[in-house]
Amino acid sequence: MRKGMLFAATAYVIWGLLPLYFKALQSIAPTQIMLHRMVWSLLFLLCVLAWRKQWSWLADAVRQPKVLATFLLSAVLLSTNWFTYIWAVNNGRIIDSSLGYFINPLVNVLLGYVVLGERLRGVQWLAVALAAAGVAWLTWITGQPPWIGLTLALSFGFYGLMRKTATLGPLEGLSLETLLLFPFALAALVWLTLHQQNAFLDAPTRSQWLLMAAGPITAVPLLLFAAGARRIPMATLGLLQYIGPSLQLALGVLLYNESFSGDRLIGFAAIWSALVVYSGESVWRAWRNRSASPATTES
């Protein structure tokens, strides 16, 4: 339990501090950062697979067109999420990106209802309604939907849905996704190099090392999260997941001085209220189930 909480919390802290990493690469275009993230992530994951001698799954996966098609789609969703997040951070929209990960749990609840046919309890409907009111308020005060937050929440929500029903584990799945993205990323980098537009070649040594570090920075928190998720209850995991967007919001407001006016605060407050309602009900149900278990066993 303690190890699980430590693993999961560390993963969320790393994700929450990612704006610091991408801000350090602000001189490089978001598209090129994403391309390097694909390439170096694959190389790092191949090293992990080689160290663990974990190759048997790959032969089975490449022989199944349905598996390849599924993971190609999840790879597209993942790259969409990556690009949107990188662009948002390096264009002074960290607060908007944090919104996406605040509402992501409620998007997951809705996707479970619409796609998987899961039933929603009344309190969950209340949480969804509060979040929808917050998004509607932010749309009204800005004149447009909070597209960054919605893109991040929906892309990661659908990605999570696909991975929930996937046949491969976290390490194997991410390895296959980056393997499928690798030819496109490599071709794009070769094209940029031939046209003398590959920023990596002219970047300072520090930036080159940071780009190469995209591999472990991408893979390590995912592996920590997977290890933690296996050891702790979902209710605990649900509470820990707010570490990431909370750190992002704090960085946006306190370190990078992004605007967080009273009007925006009202919209965020509605969404935070939704999360309190949703998480509180989940914790209460988990506590009630644990309390009922001894009585059931005794009887």
Image (cartoon, rainbow, N blue to C red):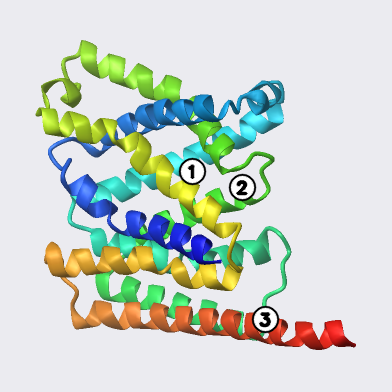
Seen at 24% across and 81% down, the residue is 263
Seen at 63% across and 36% down, the residue is 70
| In-image side of 80 versus 258 (left or right) | right
Q: Which mark is residue 162?
A: 2
| Three-letter amino acid code of the residue under disc 2 | Met
- Name the secondary structure under disc 3: loop
| In-image side of 187 versus 200 (left or right) | right
Seen at 49% across and 54% down, the residue is 225
Q: Position of residue 100 (x, y in %)?
A: 39, 62
Judging by the rendered image, the residue that carries numbered circle 3 is: 121
The crowding category of the residue bearing disc 1, from other C-alpha atoms within 10 Å (few below 14, some 14 to 19, many at least 20), is many
Q: Give the mark, 1 or 3, whose residue is nearer the N terminus.
A: 1
| Three-letter amino acid code of the residue under disc 3 | Arg
Q: Position of residue 205 (x, y in %)?
A: 12, 28
Q: Position of residue 166 (x, y in %)?
A: 66, 43
C-alpha span from label 1 to label 3: 29 Å
Q: Are marks 1 and 2 in contact (CB under 8 Å)?
A: yes
Residue 281 figure quarter = bottom right
Vertical arrangement, residue 264 with respect to residue 78, above or below: below
Q: Nearer the viewer, residue 2 or 84?
A: 2
| In-image side of 153 versus 214 (left or right) | right
Q: Give the mark, 1 or 2, whose residue is nearer the N terminus.
A: 1
Q: Are marks 2 and 3 in contact (CB under 8 Å)?
A: no
C-alpha span from label 2 to label 3: 23 Å
Vertical arrangement, residue 254 with respect to residue 79, above or below: below
Seen at 39% across and 73% down, the residue is 135
C-alpha span from label 1 to label 2: 10 Å
Report the residue that reaches farthest toward the top.
Answer: 194
Judging by the rendered image, the residue that carries numbered circle 1 is: 77
**Any part of residue 80 in sight:** no
